[in-house]
Every structure is written in structure tokens, then in C-alpha cells.
Amino acid sequence: MSRNFSAIRYIDKWSVLLYFMLVLFGWLNIYGASVGENQTSIFDISYRSGMQFLWICVSLAVALVIVLSDGKYYSIFAYQLYWLAILALIVTVFVAPDIKGSRSWLPLGPFSVQPAEFAKFITALGLAKLMSQPHFRLQGWRSYFQAAGMVLLPLLIIILQKETGSALVYLSFVIMFYREGMPGIVPAVGVCAVVLFVTVIRLGGIDMFGIGDASLGLFLGLALTFVLFLIFTAHYTRDRRCVLYMLAGAALVAAVTALLRLFFVKVNPVYVAVGVVAVSSLYMAVLAVMRWRRSYLLALCFLVGFSAYCFSAGYIFDRVLQPHQQMRIMVLLGMADDPTGISYNTNQARIAIGSGGLLGKGFMQGTQTKLKYVPEQDTDFIFCTVGEEWGFVGSAGVLIVYLIFLNRLISLAERQQDRFVRVYGYCVVGIFAFHLMINVGMVLGLAPVIGIPLPFFSYGGSSLLSFTILLFIFLRLDTTRIERTR
Amino acid sequence: MLRDQYKNRSLSVRLVLFFIVLVFIVRLLVMQLSGEYKDIAEGNAFYRKTLYAPRGLIYDRNGKLLVYNQPTYDLMVTVKEMRDAARDGNPIDTAELCSLLGMTVEQFEERMADIRNVKKNPGYSQLTPQRFMTQLSPIEYAVLQEKLRKFPGFSVQSRTLRNYNYPYAAHVLGSIGEVSQSMIDRDPYYRLGDYAGVSGLERSYEKELRGENGVEILLRDARGRIKGRYKDGAEDRMPVAGKNLVSTIDIDLQILAEDLLQGKTGSIVAIEPATGEILAMASSPAWNPSNMVGRLRSKYYPILLNDGTKPLLNRATQGTYSPGSTFKTLQALVCLQEGAITPDTEYPCSGPASTPIRCTHHHGSPVSLGNAIEQSCNPYFWLAYRDLLEMNGYGEDNANFKKQYEVWRSHILSFGLGPKFADTDIAEQVDGGVPTIKTYNKWYGERGWRALTIRSNAIGQGEVMVTPLQLANAAAAIANCGYYITPHLNRADSMKTHRHETTVAAEHFAPVREGMWRVCEYGTGRFYKVPDVEMCGKTGTTDNSHGKPHSIFFGFAPKENPQIAIAVVIENAGFGATWASPIASLCIEQYLKGSVERKALEERMKTSVINPDVKKF
């Protein structure tokens, strides 16, 4: 018993305080956004704010149970929990009814739960256990395969449930992997992929010089690829001379092309770029064989891979993505307008936030949200309510509180001696950060519309409960640090 | 434990998170402090419902209510609500609605298409109620209201329409109509579909009568449904009722005047000399003002516009006529003032044999002023006019003569003739005309005209043109012995500052008034004297190019302390003594005695038809 009390005593007060701030402010905003005409009390459980109050109570009870529980069981049963969650996810695919095209809600009596929400912290526990094994290092194919497999398995099953948003959350574990030693090139490649994709898709339709097939997007994509390749090569091979050669060669080709253009000889710049890439690839291949160093081979792979990616970006966009996803991306990039569909949501969200001004319209005075111009105003678009009713001060305040919260969690993770706890902690940071980034980014029109909740704010029992569990397991594990030193 | 070689990576994670939140905050800053979204949000959510201010009432000078408001109802349609209902499997029964409204399904579809046509209906929004049908009567509304909930999207907005206690005074009161685009551009107060005074008093006192519309800010949700009032009505504005107007019109006199004009084209204007208040202003043909209201207006307006008798023309202020012999009184006053004649000056008259202007009456010779007015002697006034103009000879290049002409002209203008009254509240007026030297120079050349050339002016048959209003005003000026107050229609405005002195001194009026009295006692007006009332007047019979001469009378009564000045013009009726004189006499009797005792005369005048095309609309 004395140990359990110590857990409460030593639990990180800052995190708990920030958690309460976010949950309570979120609850107020759910009330503001969804208050009904006849609703007299925030506790009225026939309305959403009342239901959210119930869920807050449930979450606090669960949090208390977690704090009082024995910290070591999380590590011990991590794998068993993981496989149980996978099983639940698979069962859900077959059992769950179709709700707005999604098959992720498992009916349990009067409630329905979303196993995908709970699979997040369980996967995090599983990963923590895997990576805290003695001698486990993020090196070699085997360890990567294990770790990546652990993430990708639930991710794929959730995609089968048509919950792409929740599935993408699993990508947030990259933050943890990065912290645990994954080479920085991996997230860098990811960022490059996104940048190239946007470049090729956004500018793909613009024809250069009026020559057929001379897509500006493709040309810029290839040019960007080439520049990134040069940086990559310089960094990994440390062969400055070969980089200079290639740079000079490319500059020469560009100059000649420009000169020809002056004399009205129209050369398709895409072909020129392809030529430069091809010659450089050949050069890299020759160097790789002659000097027999893996770095040259990697540089070659980088160049060829990304060049091919540039050419196939359009194909991926057209064939792999579903029409509604294509539309969301096109709307985000300003390539399409869909005033009654997805643009409606984002436009109204923007109007709601924008009309808030510096100090907002006041609690429950938001017209955009209260009058249901913003769809999903109390779930995925709850941040609109914050922006409209509390203005810049309120919404920027919320973001700053989140930033402090995330920083606090990073500090907690960093002070761990136990790798299990640290890995788990970074998973928590990643999940919260990803939700914040995508959700707020979507509302502000900076990210595509992906339906994932804003932690502690969005209405919904499953998400609040799962975020609470996610957080409090970490806070509980954090106290074991003190138990051990005593 | 191994040294943690990746510990510094936590810093990169923190920096990335910080950078992302920074981008978000900058984005928020740009969006929330630009201010451009606030209006869009209000446009989304606010439905500004106009609360129409009741228009001011109009009374006659004795407090009798002339114009008031009656409730009417506009049927509105909100297209989106109608569509949503249809989509939810609850489409409206168009056929039933049409039968209630008395229209065909084709008309219904056509109206809906017009509403949705942004060219025809620039303010169209599928979220706001659009006018589907205007001015349902209370009975139509009662029938419709019971079944209104069966027609989702349709709603009723109440407004007020003008209603009239008397089917008279249409020209004076004027009417209201939908505002035009140019009116909206001039005055941002108006919205498309608003009503405003377009003629008469309604137009002159539009700003006072209209009051100020209020606004109720309602909250509208994303589906266009009203969800309540914004801030519980804290920013609503209640309508301010229009101010009531007491007009100078005596409605009983007005009624008589209009009735006397039945079957005739012409006009009667009566003024209270001491105040310039217009007691009656009738123009025939006229219409029942109730017919120019609401949906009837669109039926009657084109009829009035296209009728050959031009009923829309307010002949009292927009008809110009030669003053004929009535003008001789002003001639006499000017000549007396300038010393061209004295009350005792006599001129010979050879009757119909006179030259250059023959006399139409038989009387002794020579004649003095009083006699000349009584007998309307043309030669007398020609000779007096000539003497006036030639008083200083013609001089070099006729300069002296022209100077004298200008003297005469400015005297005439001082009686309110010539340009229309600038300082009055009468909405429709045209200029009369007293030719300038320039005009004659243009017609006849610099030296091509002499007194003889313009001799017709002497007897009011020349280029001098007056409106009946100007004629009545001249009578008022004579009644006042030398001044007039601009005729006007608003009794609340004393118009004290609008007193205009004539340039003829007061002492010259007595002989002319004496002459006018003799007209009514012994002369052309003697048959229609109001019993026990000393009347002063002058008849006129003016030749014109449209057929028989116009019959004209102007005068005032009683002779001492005059209460009413009047001008009557009956177009193409013949002698002034036969028509205009009795009609004026009846009006004077009505005003001074409160009723007409000469019923036979009244009946004869009312039922005589001079222009068979004239009818009351």
C-alpha cells in the first residue's frame, strides 16, 4: 500500500495540471459548440457536454486506477496486450457495422468503442518492450524489420477498417525511432517525399513554353531531386570533387539550354533534366563499382528512386488515392474548389476562426459554430469554436499550453533511466504531437482534411479515455523511477 | 548503462514542435487579425429582418384623416428551405398553393424562375426570404395562413399599404411606389423592394413620412432556419414611425372642386391669401387614389399613362394657359405703378371696330379703368400697355423701349408669374412664361419689335403663359394688396419667411379691386354672385389652337379681408363667364359658408359634360 500512495505523491504535478487545463477547457468548448436550445446545464447528459462530463469522470477514475496500479505489469504483459489488441482490431474489421463508410466501431452493449484508439497505447507499450530488450539496437535489417512490423501490422488492419486518419497516427512513432537512433535521413526522406509530391502535383498541370509534355511540376521535381541528391552525396560520400563535377555539368547543360532558347530552339526542359539525371546516375554507378563503396550505391539509389518517384507521383495520386482523398489534397493545394463539399468545411472553419478576432466573440457567442455552419464543430473541428469564441488570445493560448505540455512530456521521457519508459514516453509525445499537428493544421487549412480528434478537446469517449490512459500509464511509469532509487 | 549517444536529439524534437506551433500561431495571427472574416461570418449567420416603420398619416386642414395605413402581407419564399423540404420527401403541393393564390402552375414556375434569376433579382440568395407575391389582402392572407405550414419555405411578411378615406385629391396626395435603382443609389436608406413616395405630398415629404425602418437581427443556422435573436435583441433597432402631416387642403372644398370638374378637363386652385395655404387643388381628369395602391397600381398606372386625356398631368401646376382677360388686372396695376395711367385716365373704344385689337363687348366710350375692367375692354388695355412701353420713346436702337419692357416684365414676375415657385413643397410644377427681351430679339431681330408687335400681351393672349396655381397666386397677391406667400401644402409650415412683395405699391390696388368687384356685381360675373358676399374677380376667354376657347376665372372673396383666392380653368369650354365663373362662385360659397345652397347651379355644373372622353379612374 505504501508504494501505491507514493505513486500519487510523486506523480508529475505539472503534467496533471496541464491535462486538467486542457480537458476542462475542451469541455467548456464542447458545451459552447453544441449547446442545444433547451439545454439549461452543462451537465445535462442528453446533450454532448453532459456526456463529455460523464466521460471525463470515467477517464479520471481510470486514471486513478492506473496510478494506483503496479507499474511493472505494463512491461510484463506488453506483448500479450499487443496481440490481444491486434486480435480485437481484426475482429472489428469483420464485426463492426458500417458507420459513414468506416468499420471501426465495436458495439459493446449501450456503448460502442473504437479499438483503434486503444491500440495506440498498446502498440506503444509493445514497441517499448521490444526496444528495451537488452542489446536491442536500431541497427541492421532484423531490428528494423521487427520494429517496423510492430507498427505496420495495426496500421494496415486499421486501413482495412477505412480509418485512414487513425492509421496515419502510427506514423508518429517515427519521432520515437528518431530519438532512439534511427538515422536522420529517414524522416528527411519522408519530408522530401512530401515536398516532391506537392511540387509535382501542384505544378503538374502547368506546361512550360507551350511544348506538350513539358510539365513544370515534373521539371521542378527532378531539379529538386537533383539538388537533394547532390547534398546527400556530399554528406555521405564526402567526395566533394565528384559533386562539383556534377554541379558544373548540370550548370553547363542548363546554360546551353537557355542559350538555345534565346535562338528560338525549343528544347523540352524535362528531357534535359532526365538527361542530366541519367548521366549522373551512370557516373554514380561507375564510381560505386570502381571505388566499391556503399555510400555511392546509396546515392545512386536516392537519385534513381526519387526520379522515378517524381514520374510516378501523378500515378500514385490518380490511382492509389481515393477520389475523396484526391479532392481533399487538391482543395488544400488550392487546385480545386468544392464549395458544397470538402471546401465548405474548410472555408467555414476558416471563417469561424477568422471572425474570432483578437479576443473572440465570447463564450457561447460564436455564430459560425453554434449555428452549425462548421460541420463536426464539437469533434474534429472543435478548434474552430476555440478560435471563434476565444479569439487569437484563446486559440494561441491553447497551442502554447499544448507546447508546454509536450515539452514537459519530453523532459519526463528524457529523465528516465529505464529505456522502456523513455521509449513509451516518446511514443506518447509522438501521438499527441501528430494529433495536434494534423488536427489544428487541418482546421487552419495547412494540412489536408484528415479526421482525427484534437486530444482532450474533441468530443468523444473513446478518444478522451484512450488519451487519458496513454498519458497516465506514462505518468505512472515515470514514478517507478523514484521507487527504484528508494 | 551505455552513454546515451542520441540524447541531443530531444532538442531537435523540441525545436520541430516549437517551429510547427509557431507556424500555427502566425497563421492564426494572419487569419484572426485581418478582420476580413468577420463580415463573412455575419453574412452567414445574421438575417437582418426589416421592421417596417408605419408611414405618417395625412390630415386635411380641419383634422379630417385623408390617408392612413392598412396592413398588407407579402408572401415570401426561401428557396433553400423549399428545396430541402422537397429533398426530405416533403415537396409542396404546387397545384394547391397556386389555387390559393389564384395563379396557374406555369405562372408559379415562371415566378420562381424570375426570383432565381440574378439579373432580374440582384439581391437573390437562396437562404433569405424572397418576395414571391406582394400585397395580399387581409382576406387572402387569412385563407393562406391556415395552410401555410403545408408549404415549407413560404412565409408571410406584413407591411402596410396606403389607404384613403376619400376618393379625391389624388394629384395633391400623390402615391408611393417601389423605389428605383437610381433612388437606391442616391439614398442608401432604401433597399430593393422598399416603397417611397413618387409623387405629390408623398414625394415632397418622403423623409418625414417614411420614418425610419428598424431591423431585427436574427440568427440563421446553416440550413437557413431561424434560431433566435442575436444577443436577445440587444442590437435590434425599433422602427420609428413616420411623422403625421397636416395638409392645407380643405377636403370638402377639394371634393366639390373635383366634382364640379366632372366631364371637363381643367383645374381649380384655391388659396388662402393671408397664408398662402392651398385650400384646394383639383385637376381633371383625376383618379381614385385607392386605385394606385398595391397590386391595383400596376393595373391602373399604364391605363392612366396612356389615356388621351392625360390624367396623370396635374393641370393645376403642370398645365400652362394664356391668362386671357384675367391678365388685364395685372396690366392695370403695372400701368398705375409706372404712371402710364391714373385711375381717371380714359381711352376711346370703337367696339368691335377698334384697331389693332377689337373689343368684344359693347359699352360706352371713352372708358376709364373701373369700367374697362368691368367690361373687359381690349382697346383700353392695349392703349395703356402701349403708353407704358412707349413712355420714354423708343430711343437709340429701341433701347428705351426695351428697358421699359423689362420694367413691365419684372413687375409681372413679382406676382409670381414666370418661373415655377422654387420655395414650395409642391412636387410637380412647370414654369409659366413671360418672354424675355432675348426671346423677342431672337424672333424679331434686335430692332424688329415694338409695342405693336407684342400687343397681344396687353390682353393676356400673347406669349405670357401661366399655370392655374400662378393665376390663383396672382389673385391672392391682389387680395393682399401687394404681397403673396408662396402657395404650399403643409399646414405646419407657416412659410412666414416666404412672403414675396409685389413691386406695385399698395395704394394702386384699390381701383383695380374696385374694377374686379364691378365685374362680379355688374359685369361678366354678375350672374353667379354668391349671395351676401362681395366678390372680386375677372373672367377670361382665351383663344387657343385646340378648339373652343378656354374658360377662365380668377378672383377672391370677400372683398374686404379676403378669405379665399381662386383660379378656375376649364379647357375648351367657351366663355369664362359661362363656366369658370359659376364654378369659382360655387367653390367660394362652399368655403365661406361651409355648404352650397345653390343646388340647381351646383347640379348643372357637376353634370355638364364638355369633354366626353373625361372619366374618373
Image (cartoon, rainbow, N blue to C red):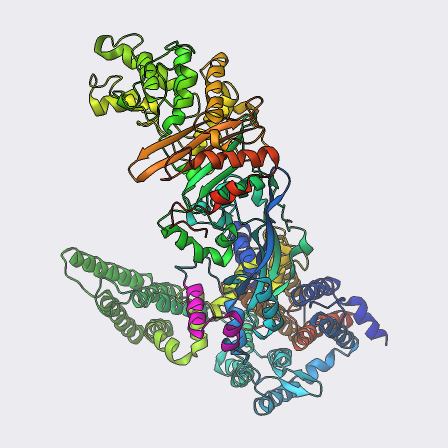
Q: Quadrant of residue B467?
A: top left
Please check the rendered image and state whether residue A155 is part of the magenta-colored stretch, yes or no: no
Q: The C terminus of chain A lies in which quarter of the figure?
A: bottom right
Please check the rendered image and state whether residue B110 is part of the magenta-colored stretch, yes or no: yes
Considering depth in this image, is B438 or B474 the residue closer to the camera? B474
Relative vertical location of residue A470 with respect to residue B180 in this rendering, above or below: below
Q: Quadrant of residue A274?
A: bottom left
At x 43%, y 49%, the residue is B180
Of all residues, the one furthest to the right in this rendering is A1
Residue B188 visible from this viewpoint: no
Relative vertical location of residue A449 with respect to residue B574 in this rendering, above or below: below
Relative vertical location of residue B488 with respect to residue B609 in this rendering, above or below: above
At x 55%, y 42%, the residue is B599
Considering depth in this image, is B262 or A274 the residue closer to the camera? B262
In the image: residue A37, left or right of residue B38: right
In the image: residue B185, left or right of residue A354: left
* Magenta stretch bounds: B95-117
Relative vertical location of residue A413 with respect to residue B316 in this rendering, above or below: below
At x 78%, y 75%, the residue is A61
Considering depth in this image, is B34 or A243 the residue closer to the camera? B34
Across and down, in percent, residue A319 comes to 38, 80
Q: Main secondary structure of the magenta part?
A: helix
Considering depth in this image, is A274 or B454 the residue closer to the camera? B454
